[in-house]
Amino acid sequence: MVVCVHLPRFELVLAAGGSGALAGRALALAPQMGAEQRVGEVSGAAEACGVSRGMMLGEALARCPEMALVPPDPVGVAEAWEESLTALESIGAALEPAAPGLAYFRADGLLGIHGTREAVLAATRRALARPARMGGAPTRFCSLAAAMAVRSRRPLLLDDAHAARWLAGQPVGLLGYREETAALVAPLQRLGVRTLGELAKLGRAALTDRFGAPGTLAHRLACGGDTPLRARSLQERLAETMEVGQASSGEALARVLGVLVDRLLARSERRGRTLRAVTLSARLLSGGGWRERVVFRQALGDPERIRLALSLRLALLPAPAGALGLAVERFGPPASEQVSLHEESRTARAARLREAVAQMRAVAGPEAALRAVCVDPDSRVPERRVVLTPIPE
């Protein structure tokens, strides 16, 4: 059984200062500076006026003129979500985080620790120490639908025999919680498709012909299927934070960044390893926060090159900062193991290829680097001739 844990309006609650701030008020997360002008998560009062997440700002204000915009706080969201994930992992769960406030894990492996599925869910609720909706089902998507259907603290559990039939009556808007199928919700609703059962009746061929690969996945989800869970790998994470003071912008802020880089490289926990991916964050004086993930083109251990790469991102700050933070997301090989680019030996070329594969996966995920393996070259079906398989690091 796959368990879905959903913390409603997670980002909005943190940005607004608590769930009590949402009671009876029409609130929405303001669009990010420089991004498309679409609102983020909205409160229940704003939803009652017809405002939904992802709606254009002008349309949202036209539907709900009294709606207040709350500046987003990605730094606080990232910290609070990491605390929640760590709390869930403390009960033994191997988590797949989908988005802030939404995570999945398989409960069958925890029965030996907690006894029953109900005990697993009770331990999950105690670990979170905040209101959460939970659902259990054979697949990830079914468990998401079960969690969204819950309106109380009692979780909804679906068995294999009734999950697909129950799923047919759920709204097609659930596809918006999957990045691959989110763009299909609006056109499907315009076509009059309201439930997942109606979507499944359209047929896989018709959906694939109209929407391509996302249509195929949407039909599979509507029929109760899904891809396997992928638990996140535990990564060692180092972080440094510094109050900016009077150096809220300009050259002084770059010097503060240099101090953070030096402190991070001097940490004994680094053990001489290079840095492959880091997160640069800031607390804004105007409220909220700013966060930017940076993946270096090559794993770096030189403080000057790291400062140069990160200083370009400081220009993206939407407002003066009150505090600056730098955290390591992924480490590279130790600096002593880095080979020179002038070496042309076979071993050096293989090492550079492995490093390129690791960098690509750090940017775009584990499936970003694949190789084509010829399986059946004489097949009349193109998909059977070549199979994509991960490149070993």
Image (cartoon, grey):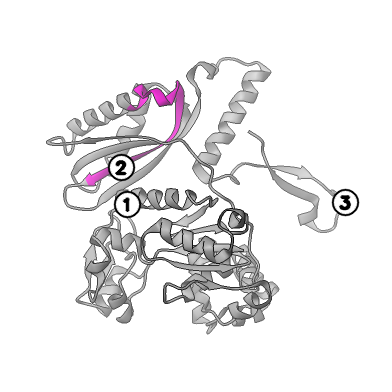
Q: Residue at x 27, y 27 (%)?
A: 258
Dot 2: what SS? strand
Residue position marked by numbered label 3 in the rendering: 378
Q: Amino acid at mark 3?
A: Asp
Between disc 1 and disc 3, the foreground one is: 1
Q: Residue furthest front?
A: 115
Secondary element type, mark 3: loop
Which marked residue is nearer to the observer: mark 2 or mark 3? 2
Local packing at callout 1 (Cα closer than 10 Å; few below 14, some 14-19, many 20+) is: many
Instruction: Give the mark nearer the N terminus: 1 vs 2.
Output: 1
Q: Residue at x 32, y 52 (%)?
A: 74
Residue at figure coordinates x 42%, y 25% from the top left: 270
Q: Are marks 1 and 2 in contact (CB under 8 Å)?
A: yes
Please give the range of residues in magenta.
264-283
Place of residue 282 in the rendered image (x, y in percent of width and height, measured from the top left): 26, 43
Which residue position holds label 1? 74
Extreme residue in the bottom direction: 192
